[in-house]
Amino acid sequence: MASSVFRERWGIRLGVFASLCLVLLVLRFHGQRRELSAPIAIIPPASVRSLAQIHIDWQKAVRDILTTYEQDHQAIRARDALLALTVAPTDQQTHLQLVLGLNAISEGAPSAEAKWKAAKQAFLQQPSI
């Protein structure tokens, strides 16, 4: 009857088990050290603009977009350019009306021109800072 070496000698079994535990412990410790020693990315602080500066930048950008739209009459391009802007809370209603007006023109809505003219007039009547 053939017998296993592992069955007869408990010392060998214990040694193999201890070796495996040691290898797992070393691998785990080495992985944690690698995570701790990884360089930390330094992220520059986000630039903070005041609401007044956002309003001024928005007005200038909208004026540029309106000028471009008056030249090429591409409502979708103008609408997308407006959607990319950062808008102060006080300007959101006017901005929305401009976007909806250009969207109505791009879709060929019946009252699109009237909607666009009203939105444009509301923008032009805003006081600049």
Image: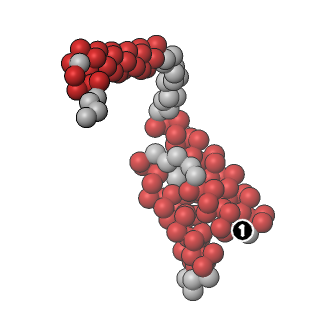
Give left or right: position of 45 versus 64.
Answer: left
Residue 18, horizontal then vertical, whole percent: 28, 16
Instruction: Indicate whether 89 appears above or below 74.
Output: above
Task: Please report the residue visible at 68 percent of the width from the left and 63 percent of the height from the top.
Answer: 77
User: Quadrant of the image for the N terminus?
Assistant: top left
Mark 1, residue position: 74
User: Quadrant of the image for the C terminus?
Assistant: top right
Task: Please report the residue visible at 66 percent of the width from the left and 69 percent of the height from the top.
Answer: 75
Residue 3, horizontal then vertical, whole percent: 26, 30
Which picture quadrant has residue 66? bottom right
Task: Please report the residue visible at 41 percent of the width from the left and 48 percent of the height from the top.
Answer: 89
Instruction: Indicate whether 41 appears above or below 126.
Output: above
Q: Which residue lies furthest to the right in this view?
A: 71
Rendered image coloring scheme: secondary structure
Q: Nearer the viewer, residue 17 or 61?
A: 17
Give left or right: position of 12 versus 85.
Answer: left
Task: Identify the amino acid type marked 1.
Answer: Gln
Give left or right: position of 32 versus 116.
Answer: left
Q: Which of 44 and 61 is in front in this view?
A: 44
Task: Please report the residue visible at 52 percent of the width from the left and 69 percent of the height from the top.
Answer: 100
